[in-house]
Image: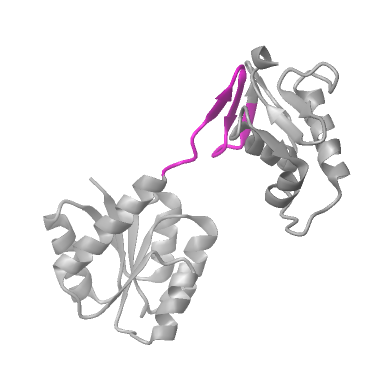
Amino acid sequence: MPQVLVVEDDPEVRDALLRFLVGHGYATRSAPTGLAGLRDVLQDPPDLVVLDLGLPDVDGAELLGMVRAVSKVPVVVVTARDAEEQIVALLNAGADDYLVKPFSAAQLDARIRAVLRRGAADGPPRSITVGDLSIDPGARIARLGSETLDLAPREFELLRYLAERAGQVVTKRELLSEVWQMAYGGAEKTVDVHLSWLRRKLGETASEPRYLYTVRGVGVRLAEPAEG
């Protein structure tokens, strides 16, 4: 049963929304102010927030920014404001959908279910396993057997990128573009240095690889030790 938090200051509107949501199978709770809603999100994250913009303590648009700074919880904005530039600004600021009052109960239900479906489809990043090497992208933890690897942020991103393409040869130019975000190229020596650091932490060398195999003149391939 999805948990929906309604942030709405008007008691009649709030009660009507809660009755409707309960009747359509949602577990609900509410907050009459923006800061109370933010506190609720932090203390007990809901599955989705229905957010009114006209709040007494903080504007809903500002609250949306606060929520996005601390949480990825889906937010459906409901408001009487219908200016196109306002809608575009809120969607760009992180709102998942936007409904202009008045709207039908069926329309709200459809929007909530669509947002929740998108979230379920995205899901958490999947774990990656290559031989005894395992990577949890969500927790940002890499392990070799039972040992947790002590990786700097860039080392982790490099290892993850290669592991996601296990068995494929990845060029240094691609690594500079995708891991270092150097769209117009950069010093390939940077990749070499980080690969050297990774090899040391994986217990291997360039001449005796276990996971990271250099393909001379092309790039590098991450693969199970048995493939070497």
Foreground residue among 11 and 5: 5
Give the number of marks. Answer: 0
Residue 57 in view here: no
In the image, residue 210 above or below residue 115: above
Foreground residue among 137 and 23: 137
Residue 62 location, x and y as percent?
Answer: 49, 74
Q: Is residue 101 left or right of residue 42?
A: left
Q: Is residue 93 left or right of residue 36?
A: right
Q: Is residue 186 left or right of residue 11?
A: right
Residue 53 location, x and y as percent?
Answer: 37, 77
Whether residue 129 appears in magenta in the rendering, the answer is: yes
Residue at the left extreme of this rendering: 23
Residue at the top extreme of this rendering: 226
Please give the range of residues in magenta: 123-142
In the image, residue 206 above or below residue 59: above
| Residue drawn at 61 percent across, 37 percent down | 140
Whether residue 95 appears in magenta in the rendering, the answer is: no
Question: Which of the 4 image quarters holds residue 109?
Answer: bottom left
- Quadrant where the N terminus sits is top left
Residue 158 location, x and y as percent?
Answer: 70, 39
Residue 26 in view here: yes
Visual colour scheme: one colour
In the image, residue 7 above or below residue 121: below
Q: Is residue 88 left or right of residue 208?
A: left
Foreground residue among 125 and 176: 176
- Quadrant where the C terminus sits is top right
Residue at the front extreme of this rendering: 217
Residue 183 location, x and y as percent?
Answer: 73, 58
| Residue drawn at 69 percent across, 37 percent down | 170
| Residue drawn at 28 percent across, 51 percent down | 3
